[in-house]
Image: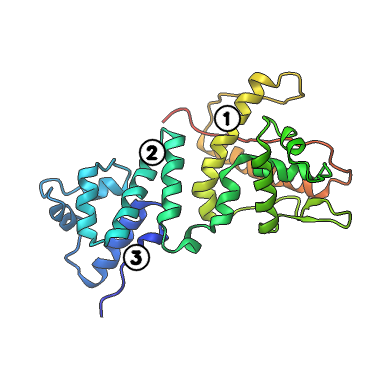
């Protein structure tokens, strides 16, 4: 009996799907090699194409169509695959990437495998987490206009109202004994898929907020440091370990803060290569 091929709706990276598909087919058909795939795609002279794609090579719309035929995807699967390819290859346009991610959520046939739609709604907008933190220091009395103005930059009252409803439904906030909404936990974390994709979108929005704060919010106290460094591989690992430890310590400080919170701050840590 032939083993089942992977379910495209369970993937957030089309290259991982292609790799798993080839392995599954090869398990019961040893002739289904990477070279065979190149032949079926109409490029027999270039046997490395499939391997190059798995390694990050750009896939044009022409070859997307050929892959769909090779993978024997039905109409819904094919549409999801097309959008997934576009999403993974939209590396230089955050807005375009978000548009494709919205489409993936709407097209996905097994949403629990990717992300719960309500959780997706929470991380889709940066102001949800900002409002959640503000509720920890502000007794909200259903004045959505006033609440919306406390966010920087300010948001419409309608967005504040929708955010409160969403967080209450998710159990991220709940009314205390005085009837005020408060966070149910001081800090929350996400699952692996959210970290890989949705949080990437969320972080891009936070970077935009950081830029605005740097340019427009000069009167407020800020700690901004930028360093360009040269480091060895061993030194790099040490820095990464210290950053992870620092991130954990910050989370612990928030949990153990014995004084009532009276302000909301955002902390972004960015450590990335500027050379190959």
Looking at the picture, does residue 92 appear above or below residue 42?
above
Judged left or right of residue 243, residue 230 is left
Give coordinates of residue 138: x percent, y percent.
82, 42
* Residue 6, numbered circle: 3
Whether pointer 2 and pointer 1 mark residues with C-beta atoms closer than 8 Å, the reply is no
Give coordinates of residue 83: x percent, y percent.
35, 48
| Residue 157 vs residue 131, the one in the foreground | 157
Give coordinates of residue 254: x percent, y percent.
78, 45
Q: Which residue is mark 2?
A: 90
| Residue 229 vs residue 156, the one in the foreground | 156
The image quadrant where one finds the N terminus is bottom left
SS of the residue at dot 1? helix
Among the two numbered marks 2 and 1 on one chain, the one whose residue lies closer to the N terminus: 2
Q: Residues within 10 Å of mark 1 (few under 14, many from 20)?
A: few
Question: Which residue is at a point 23% across and 53% down the rendered structure image?
Answer: 67
Among the two numbered marks 3 and 1 on one chain, the one whose residue lies closer to the N terminus: 3
Q: Residues within 10 Å of mark 3 (few under 14, many from 20)?
A: some
Spatial distance from mark 2 to mark 3, Cα to Cα?
24 Å
* Residue 208, numbered circle: 1
Spatial distance from mark 3 to mark 1, Cα to Cα?
37 Å
Among the two numbered marks 2 and 3 on one chain, the one whose residue lies closer to the N terminus: 3
The image quadrant where one finds the C terminus is top left
Judged left or right of residue 133, residue 244 is left
> Which residue extends farthest left?
45
SS of the residue at dot 3? loop
Give coordinates of residue 271: x percent, y percent.
56, 34
Question: Which residue is at a point 24% across and 66% down the rendered structure image?
Answer: 26
Q: Give the label, 2 or 3, closer to the camera.
A: 2
* Residue 253, numbered circle: none
| Residue 235 vs residue 115, the one in the foreground | 115
């Amino acid at each position: 009996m032939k083993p089942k091929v992977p379910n495209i709706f369970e993937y957030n990276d089309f290259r991982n799907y292609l790799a798993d598909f080839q392995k599954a087919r090869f398990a019961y058909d040893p002739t289904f090699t990477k070279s065979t795939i190149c032949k079926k795609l109409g490029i027999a002279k270039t046997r490395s194409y499939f391997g190059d794609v798995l390694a990050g090579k750009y896939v044009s719309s022409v070859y997307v169509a050929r892959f769909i035929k090779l993978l024997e995807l039905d109409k819904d699967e094919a549409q999801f695959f097309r959008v997934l390819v576009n999403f993974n290859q939209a590396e230089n346009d955050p807005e375009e990437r978000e548009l494709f991610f919205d489409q993936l959520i709407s097209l996905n046939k097994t949403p629990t495998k990717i992300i719960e739609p309500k959780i997706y709604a929470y991380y889709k907008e940066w102001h949800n987490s900002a409002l959640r933190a503000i509720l920890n220091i502000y007794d909200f009395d259903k004045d959505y206009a006033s609440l919306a103005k406390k966010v920087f930059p300010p948001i419409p009252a309608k967005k504040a109202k929708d955010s409160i409803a969403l967080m209450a439904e998710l159990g991220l906030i709940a009314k205390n004994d005085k009837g005020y909404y408060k966070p149910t936990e001081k800090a929350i974390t996400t699952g692996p898929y959210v970290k890989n994709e949705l949080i990437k979108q969320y972080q891009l929005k936070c970077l935009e907020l950081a830029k605005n704060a740097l340019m427009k919010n000069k009167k407020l106290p800020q700690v901004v440091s930028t360093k360009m460094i040269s480091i060895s591989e061993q030194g790099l690992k040490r820095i990464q370990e210290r950053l992870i430890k620092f991130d954990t310590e910050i989370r612990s400080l928030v949990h153990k803060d014995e004084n009532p919170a009276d302000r909301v701050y955002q902390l972004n840590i960015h450590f990335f290569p500027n050379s190959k």
